[in-house]
Every structure is written in C-alpha cells, then in structure tokens.
C-alpha cells in the first residue's frame, strides 16, 4: 500500500522503513570485497542487491530497479551505480547470485556460539532500534569494524538488529569474467557506510531500520 508523503509523524519522528533478510559479507584473495543484501521483506518487496569494493577502492552498486538503486544510493556511498537484474537463489547452505558482470557462489557452515546466541533473540526485539543501540558497543568490541547503529547519507539514521550468523566456508566469484580468487577476510573493511561487515566472511540474518532524513518524503509506492 502506498503511503502519503510526510516528513514527520505525529510524534515528530521521521518515517522509518524496515528491511528483513540477510547480509553476506565476503572477501576474496584478489582484494575485491562483496556485500550481498538478500531481503525477503522490505518496503520495495523482496529483492537482492550487491555492493562491490574493488582493490582500487572503487565502490559499485548493482541494484535491480531504478527506485531501489536510488534509495540505496541515498543511504550509502558509491562511485558507480548499475541497474540490472540481480537474482539470488538459496538452497540450504548453498547460495548462487547472478548480477550482471558478477557471478557469485558461496556456501555457509554451521553456526558458532555467536550465531546460536543471536538465534535466541526474539524477532520483535531484534527489530527495535533501542536494542540495536544497546548492542552497538559489544558489536564493536567483538567484531572489528561492525556497527549496529549510525548516521547514513542524506541525514538518514540506521539500526541493524542481527538474528543469526553463519560463517561462509567456500566461495567462487568472477567479475567481468575475471576470477576473483579464493575466499579471504573482508580486509580492508568496506567503505559504503558508517560501518563494515565482519572481517570473517559470514551471512547474517538481520532486521534493518532506516529513519529518513528531515526533508525526505516516504519513497512513492512504499
């Protein structure tokens, strides 16, 4: 259902949009780092997108529609934005992603202690910004570069509530037909927003809340 445009709700709080799905952070021995967003529920429906940072530092966004590309571009920082089909298929532990010049396959392993702990967090609690604010300190201490709240582009704010964590144990990836090499840590950290993904490649189930900026309207159609 479409929302009417409004900069603030009755309580003076800017509109908040919620995304539920998975984020996979992957490093390769070539130095290219990849962040996949695989969203089952969002204001834009189900979709996937890919952020790529090359060894040169160039940051790419591969997004499936102009509307989604614009929303992500206004939240994070990129040098190049491409709108093209992004297909992500998950069969158990096996993931396969086709996104224009990127062909990506990876496999997740068994949960570790942190994954088991996150699985115990109720979904309703993980989706609350107050919970993300509470976990920001421990996330910084345990997972270098990871933040669970922060300020994004265009005056937006974001909160991340993790609900599961699985290590990535194998990967094959090619960009523009060039093999990106073996699975490697996400090093250096990616620079799309205020925080990075875990250094150890992983897929994280997550609820992301985005508060729009002061002068923003709710995107049409959301």
Image (tube, rainbow, N blue to C red):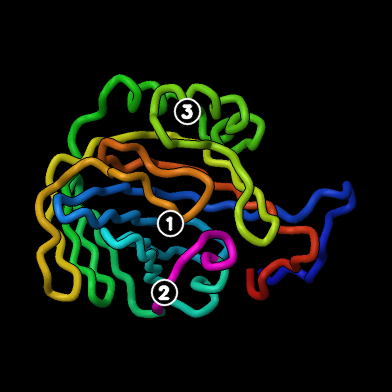
In the figure, 36 relative to 44: above or below? above
Asked if 147 appears above or below 135 in the picture, the reply is: below
Residue 112 lies, in percent from the top left, at 26, 24
What is the x, y in percent for residue 141? 45, 22
- The total of numbered circles placed on residues is 3
Mark 2: which secondary structure? strand
Q: Earlier in the sequence, mark 3 or mark 2?
A: 2
CB within 8 Å, label 1 to label 2: no
Pointer 1 or 2: first along the chain:
1
Badges 3 and 2: C-beta atoms under 8 Å apart? no
Instruction: Please give left or right for residue 79 compared with residue 76 in the image.
Output: left
Task: Give the quadrant of residue 79.
Answer: bottom left
Secondary structure at badge 3 equals: helix
Residue 48, position as x, y percentages in the image: 38, 63
**Front-lying residue, 66 or 143:** 143
Report the Cα–Cα distance between label 3 and label 2.
Answer: 29 Å
Q: Left or right: where does residue 135 sit relative to residue 155?
A: left
Which residue in the rendered view is the most extreme toward the front? 56
Say whether residue 97 is magenta.
no
Query: Which quarter shows the N terminus?
Result: bottom right
Q: Secondary structure at mark 1?
A: strand
Q: Is residue 79 magenta?
A: yes
Residue 80 is marked as 2
Q: Residues within 10 Å of mark 2 (few under 14, many from 20)?
A: few
Residue drawn at point x = 82 percent, y = 65 percent:
6
**The magenta segment:** 72-82
**Dot 1, crowdedness within 10 Å: few (<14), some or many (≥20)?**
many
Q: Which residue is mark 3?
A: 140
Relative depth, front residue between 203 and 138: 138
- Residue position marked by numbered label 1 in the rendering: 39
As rendered, which of 89 and 182 lies closer to the eye?
182
Res. 50 image quadrant: bottom left
């Amino acid at each position: 259902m479409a929302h009417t445009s409004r900069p603030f709700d009755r309580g003076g709080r800017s509109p908040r949009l919620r995304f539920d799905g998975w984020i996979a952070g992957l490093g390769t021995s070539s130095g290219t780092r990849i962040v996949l967003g695989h969203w089952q529920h969002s204001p834009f429906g189900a979709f996937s997108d890919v952020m790529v940072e090359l060894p040169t530092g160039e940051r790419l966004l591969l997004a499936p529609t102009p509307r989604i590309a614009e929303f992500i571009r206004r939240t994070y920082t990129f040098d190049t934005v491409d709108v093209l089909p992004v297909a992500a298929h998950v069969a158990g532990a096996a993931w396969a992603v086709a996104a224009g010049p990127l062909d990506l396959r990876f496999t997740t392993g068994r949960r570790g202690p942190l994954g088991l702990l996150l699985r115990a967090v109720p979904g309703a609690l993980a989706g609350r910004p107050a919970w993300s604010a509470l976990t920001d300190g421990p996330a910084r201490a345990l997972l270098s570069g990871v933040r669970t709240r922060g300020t994004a582009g265009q005056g937006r704010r974001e909160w991340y509530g993790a609900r599961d964590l699985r290590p990535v144990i194998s990967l094959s990836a090619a960009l523009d037909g060039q093999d990106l090499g073996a699975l490697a840590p996400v090093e250096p950290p990616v620079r799309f927003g205020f925080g990075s993904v875990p250094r150890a490649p992983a897929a994280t189930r997550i609820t992301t809340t985005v508060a729009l900026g002061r002068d923003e309207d709710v995107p049409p159609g959301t």
